[in-house]
Image (cartoon, coloured by chain):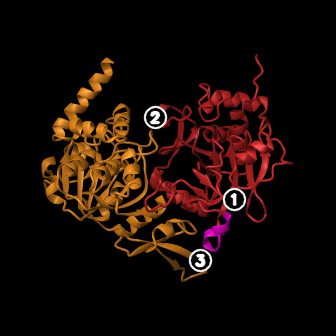
Chain colours: A red, B orange
């Protein structure tokens, strides 16, 4: 048997999995290929009680093939059409890892539009569920292409709300966790500002700063851990076609 | 039994310019596309469109028929963005927009369906949804210190929905995995026009499927239109999946004026039968390639 070596994508998957440690028996919502594998890894290792979705109308006790719905296989365990998702969001029994087109140092996220929203330079998908997610349950972000265009001083439209906006009722269940990127893992410091939790093996602090549009301190950041051989085997089994390398090239 | 069936070509006689029109489905899933195509063929314009947007919004925006759009997102699902929608927004061709959080959108529909002036929700607090919708107000709880967004009731003049089956009286049935919010759209509207793949007898509705599939009761439906392939190119499971090849062609054509003119000429210049025939030709060409 050949020994598997961890690629950058695998390091990212393991970091996603770590983000779901201690989530408990909640619905895992994962947008993107690496997050989708990461929540499967979390369920297969430290958090078996995690509930996975097929991205459509079912919670799955056995997940379908990666990026496929229940129609392609697996075992449904609950029916959760879109109408029940918003009730699950409001119940708090959910943990999201969403994408982001912009993130600022407070953790405000934008997926709505770039430029003046009245006539945007670039119209994106819309705020979707980001405002509701961020005031109801834990939210992490996944950024496959870490750049200074994404990590900006100020987001154009705060879709998911950052720590600076989480006051009053908006702050009651607000819980930003981590931002996993292809270069590093960010968390938040005591004042709610983004800080470097770890930097991926092979990335220099200078590279990371260059790709981040606001000042960060990565000088003493530890390295993001490598996945174990057991984890690598699970990742390989969940993603035999290597779809994760479309997001994070090997 | 009351017969509410209506020929597709008469649908636009029920819709007027300036109306608020709710469109069921979700993204590029079970959209009443044949009904939308009828609007494209008509002079109807100046619409307020309320939808979890997909190509329905893209097509109406490209045709310049939307005065105001109320939405949580517009997406083709397998293609994240609808180029007709993004183009219209980037050119400022949709005069007014209300971009809501998805949960807020549902709250607004529920309030509309329940004839309430608003429904409270946590979603939206602290976000720029409030900045983009300056008329949105918050409401203080009469019981404690909480404050919520008061989403105004979304009341619709007309709702357009597409289901798998119905009887002629207007009892609608979905057979796929997700009902989306089509029943809510029907309940929030003064008039509901429901297209279906097939009109069957009332008894047939429950001989092949469990009664839980009966999503929309006839008391909320005014017109039933039989339109096989009426959700094309969005999915309508289990009758058919999304036509990915066609959707790709749609999204590609939307990117230039020249290609879009050719697409319109080929697919949208005739009636529904001509559309379906052109789609069949398109599919056969793909098969022989």
Q: Position of residue B74 (x, y in %)?
A: 41, 51
Q: Residue furthest toward the top?
A: A1
Q: Residue at x 75, y 55 (%)?
A: A215
Q: Which mark is residue B146?
A: 3
Q: Is B135 on the left or on the right of B38, as rendered?
A: right
Using a 10 Å C-alpha cutoff, classify the residue at mark 2 as few (fewer than 14 neighbours), some (14 to 19) or many (20 or more): few
Q: Which mark is residue A71?
A: 2
| Mark 3 secondary-structure assignment | loop
Q: Position of residue B104 (x, y in %)?
A: 46, 64
**Would you say the magenta stretch is mainly helix, strand or loop?**
helix
Q: Is B188 on the left or on the right of B81, as rendered?
A: left
Residue at mark 3: chain: B
Q: Quadrant of residue A245?
A: top right
Q: Is residue B7 at all visible to an observer of this figure?
A: no
Q: Is A24 on the left or on the right of B4, as rendered?
A: right
Q: Residue at x 57, y 50 (%)?
A: A101
Location of mark 1 (residue): A105
Q: Is residue B94 at all visible to an observer of this figure?
A: yes
Q: Is residue B103 above or below residue A22?
A: below
Q: Which residues are magenta?
A: A163-172
Using a 10 Å C-alpha cutoff, classify the residue at mark 3 as few (fewer than 14 neighbours), some (14 to 19) or many (20 or more): some
For marks 2 and 3, give the one nearer the viewer: 3
Reply yes or no: does residue B59 show up in magenta: no
Reply yes or no: does residue A171 show up in magenta: yes
């Amino acid at each position: 048997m050949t020994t598997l070596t961890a690629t950058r994508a695998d390091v990212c998957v393991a970091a996603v999995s770590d983000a779901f440690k201690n989530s408990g028996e909640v619905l895992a919502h994962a947008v993107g290929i690496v997050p989708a594998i990461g929540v499967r890894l979390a369920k297969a290792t430290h958090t078996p009680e995690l509930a996975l979705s097929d991205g459509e109308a079912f919670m799955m006790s056995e997940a379908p093939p990666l990026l496929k719905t229940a129609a392609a296989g697996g075992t449904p365990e609950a029916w959760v059409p879109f109408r029940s998702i918003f009730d699950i969001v409001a119940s708090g029994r959910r943990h999201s890892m969403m994408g982001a087109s912009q993130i600022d140092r407070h953790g405000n996220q934008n997926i709505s539009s770039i430029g003046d929203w009245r006539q945007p330079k670039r119209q994106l998908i819309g705020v979707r569920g980001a405002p509701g997610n961020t005031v109801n349950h834990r939210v992490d972000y996944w950024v496959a292409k870490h750049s200074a265009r994404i990590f900006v001083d100020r987001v154009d439209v705060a879709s998911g709300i950052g720590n600076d906006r989480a006051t009053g009722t908006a702050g009651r269940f607000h819980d930003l966790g981590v931002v996993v990127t292809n270069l590093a893992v960010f968390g938040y410091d005591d004042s709610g500002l983004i800080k470097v939790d770890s930097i991926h093996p092979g990335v220099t602090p200078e590279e990371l700063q260059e790709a981040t549009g606001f000042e960060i301190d990565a000088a003493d950041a530890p390295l993001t851990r490598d996945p174990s051989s057991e984890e690598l085997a699970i990742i390989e089994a969940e993603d035999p076609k290597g779809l994760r390398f479309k997001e994070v090239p090997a | 039994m009351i017969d509410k069936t209506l020929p597709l070509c008469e649908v636009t006689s029920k819709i007027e310019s300036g109306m608020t029109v709710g469109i069921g489905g979700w993204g590029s899933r079970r959209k009443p596309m044949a009904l939308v195509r009828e609007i494209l063929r008509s002079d109807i314009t100046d619409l307020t469109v309320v939808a979890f947007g997909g190509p329905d919004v893209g097509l109406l925006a490209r045709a310049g028929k939307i005065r105001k759009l109320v939405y949580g997102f517009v997406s083709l699902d397998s293609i994240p963005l609808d180029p007709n929608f993004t183009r219209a927004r980037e050119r400022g061709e949709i005069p007014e927009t209300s971009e809501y959080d998805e949960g807020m959108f549902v709250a607004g529909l529920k309030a509309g369906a329940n004839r309430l002036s608003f429904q409270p929700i946590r979603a939206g607090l602290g976000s720029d949804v409030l900045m983009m919708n300056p008329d949105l107000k918050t409401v203080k709880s009469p019981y404690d210190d909480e404050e919520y967004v008061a989403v105004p009731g979304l009341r619709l003049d007309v709702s357009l929905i597409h289901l798998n089956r119905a009887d002629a009286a207007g009892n609608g049935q979905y057979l796929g995995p997700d009902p989306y919010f089509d029943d809510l759209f029907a309940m929030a509207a003064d008039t509901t026009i429901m297209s279906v793949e097939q009109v069957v007898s009332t008894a047939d509705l429950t001989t092949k499927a469990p009664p839980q599939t009966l999503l929309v009761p006839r008391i909320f439906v005014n017109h039933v239109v039989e339109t096989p392939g009426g959700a094309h190119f969005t999915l309508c499971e289990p009758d058919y999946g999304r036509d990915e090849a066609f959707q790709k062609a749609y999204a590609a054509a939307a990117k230039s004026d020249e290609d879009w003119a050719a697409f319109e000429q080929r697919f949208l210049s005739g009636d529904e039968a001509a559309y379906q025939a052109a789609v069949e030709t398109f599919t056969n060409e793909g098969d022989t390639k």
